[in-house]
Image: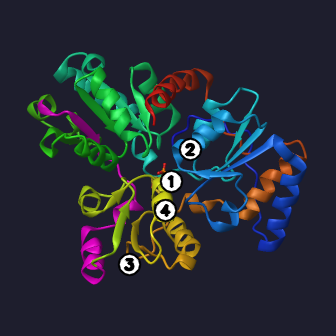
């Protein structure tokens, strides 16, 4: 994991009986009242998710954090989400991640040293990269990469606003360096009319990203070679098999899925979009969903009474292991510590980094739907 944070304290957690934990969480929430806001990403396991005051995708949750007056924002999600909450809140508000090891493997595929190296190498080919390229980081990235985008006149995107962000980015400069998720970059740019032949993949382990000068000169989108290990489990054959069996079925995918899967899907969008689309669908419909298993299981349960059949796309279990790290016992422990006046597992972004990252976040909010 990138280390742009200072953790105040790491508390050892002992796993505990489920119902007892649920009681402890409820009691601590009651005592903390409106001094506490628990935010829960849709991929959280049920025992944690049920205690969230607000749930959402990355964009919605960051807006919730920004609007909150609570002293403590406990983020049941992953590391970059808690960093964003810290950046968007006042210095006296505290962002907490119940398990400090809950990172995002995709976010870890880009780091500042590699992005700065790419920027230098791109400048060798294009002249000053700042004049030619808008750096765009997916919100799934460490705070120092958000700060990089802030100081290089770049921007941040989420799966909800990627199209608006890319439109803004192309209005500023002729090329985009998009990191860390190649799939979100490719899927979004393609829907805007950028051809696959205008996109190249930057292999961060190779000199010049493994590209020739001509490839760099001709590219509009330079896509970092990152991906999500959960969404790479979905394949176009899964869609084909489903539609052969259920020709009236609908396919909905998160844009971190591959280009081939997204091309074969009826709908593509963020976790919140997936939820809303299935919620608003006619009863008696069948859905194949390419996103994390906890969310798909929740949807299947939630809409069973309307006879909506919601299926997970991959034949194997594919959960986000880092999202899954946070359990009820850990949540109970951090909340009880707060009741005792003790902050544990705080996520704090260094002030200068936060200031620069905020520039890029604010640009994102300005262009977001
Ligand atoms: P959303 O912003 O769509 O919830 O996506 C976050 C994420 O990490 C998906 O893998
Ligand atoms: Fe990161 Fe993928 Fe997990 Fe989302 S599902 S938090 S992108 S590893």
CA gap, disc 3 to disc 1?
23 Å
CA gap, disc 2 to disc 4?
19 Å
Tell me residue 47's x, y (percent). Answer: 69, 67
Q: Is mark 1 within 8 Å of ligand 1?
A: yes
CA gap, disc 4 to disc 1?
12 Å
Question: Closer to the camera, 310 or 121?
Answer: 310
Magenta stretch: give its range: 218-246
Magenta-span inclusion, residue 228: yes
Q: In which quadrant is the C terminus drawn?
A: top left
Q: Earlier in the sequence, mark 4 or mark 3?
A: 4
The structure residue drawn at horizontal position 25% and vertical position 63%, both measured from the top left corner, is 264
Residue identified by numbered label 1: 272
Mark 4 crowdedness (10 Å alpha carbons): few <14, some 14-19, many ≥20: few
Q: Earlier in the sequence, mark 2 or mark 1?
A: 2
Residue 197: quarter of image: top left
Q: Is residue 350 left or right of residue 140?
A: right
CA gap, disc 4 to disc 3?
26 Å
Report the residue that reaches farthest toward the front: 282
Above or below 250: residue 274: above
- The color scheme shown is rainbow
Mark 3 crowdedness (10 Å alpha carbons): few <14, some 14-19, many ≥20: few
Are the residues tagged 2 and 1 within 8 Å (C-beta)? yes
Q: Earlier in the sequence, mark 3 or mark 1?
A: 1
Are the residues tagged 4 and 3 within 8 Å (C-beta)? no
Above or below 186: residue 246: below
Residue identified by numbered label 4: 280
Can you tell which of label 4 and label 3 is closer to the viewer?
4
Residue identified by numbered label 3: 315
Tell me residue 5's x, y (percent). Answer: 61, 35
Magenta-span inclusion, residue 297: no
Residue identified by numbered label 2: 60
């Amino acid at each position: 994991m990138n280390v742009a944070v200072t953790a105040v304290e790491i508390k050892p957690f002992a796993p505990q009986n489920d119902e007892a934990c649920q009681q402890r969480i409820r009691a601590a929430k009651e005592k903390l009242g409106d001094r506490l806001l628990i935010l829960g990403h849709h991929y959280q396991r049920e025992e944690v998710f049920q205690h969230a005051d607000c749930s959402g995708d990355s964009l919605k949750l960051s807006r919730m954090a920004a609007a909150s007056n609570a002293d403590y924002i406990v983020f049941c999600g992953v590391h970059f989400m808690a960093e964003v909450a810290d950046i968007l809140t006042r210095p006296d508000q505290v962002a907490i991640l119940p398990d400090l090891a809950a990172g995002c493997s995709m976010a870890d595929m880009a780091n500042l040293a590699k992005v700065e190296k790419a920027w230098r190498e791109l400048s060798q080919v294009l002249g000053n990269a700042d004049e030619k390229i808008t750096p765009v980081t997916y919100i799934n990235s460490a705070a120092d990469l958000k700060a990089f985008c802030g100081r290089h006149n770049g921007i941040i995107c989420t799966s909800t606003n990627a199209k608006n962000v890319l439109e803004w980015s192309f209005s500023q400069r002729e090329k985009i360096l998009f990191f860390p998720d190649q799939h979100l970059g490719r899927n979004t740019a393609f829907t805007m009319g950028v051809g696959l032949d205008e996109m190249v993949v930057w292999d961060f382990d190779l000199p010049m990203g493994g590209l020739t000068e001509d490839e760099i000169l001709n590219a509009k989108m330079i896509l970092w070679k990152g991906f999500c290990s959960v969404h790479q489990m979905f394949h176009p054959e899964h869609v084909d098999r489903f539609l052969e069996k259920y020709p009236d079925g609908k396919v909905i995918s998160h844009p971190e899925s591959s280009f081939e899967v997204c091309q074969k899907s009826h709908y593509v969008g963020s976790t919140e979009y997936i939820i809303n689309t299935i919620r608003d669908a006619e009863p008696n419909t069948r859905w194949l969903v390419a996103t994390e298993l906890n969310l798909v299981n929740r949807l299947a349960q939630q809409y069973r009474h309307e006879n909506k059949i919601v299926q997970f796309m991959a034949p194997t279990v594919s959960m986000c292991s880092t999202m899954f790290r946070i359990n009820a016992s850990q949540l109970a422990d951090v909340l009880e510590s707060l009741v005792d006046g003790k902050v544990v597992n705080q996520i704090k972004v260094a002030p200068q980094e936060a200031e620069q990252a905020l520039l890029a976040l604010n640009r994102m909010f300005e262009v977001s739907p």
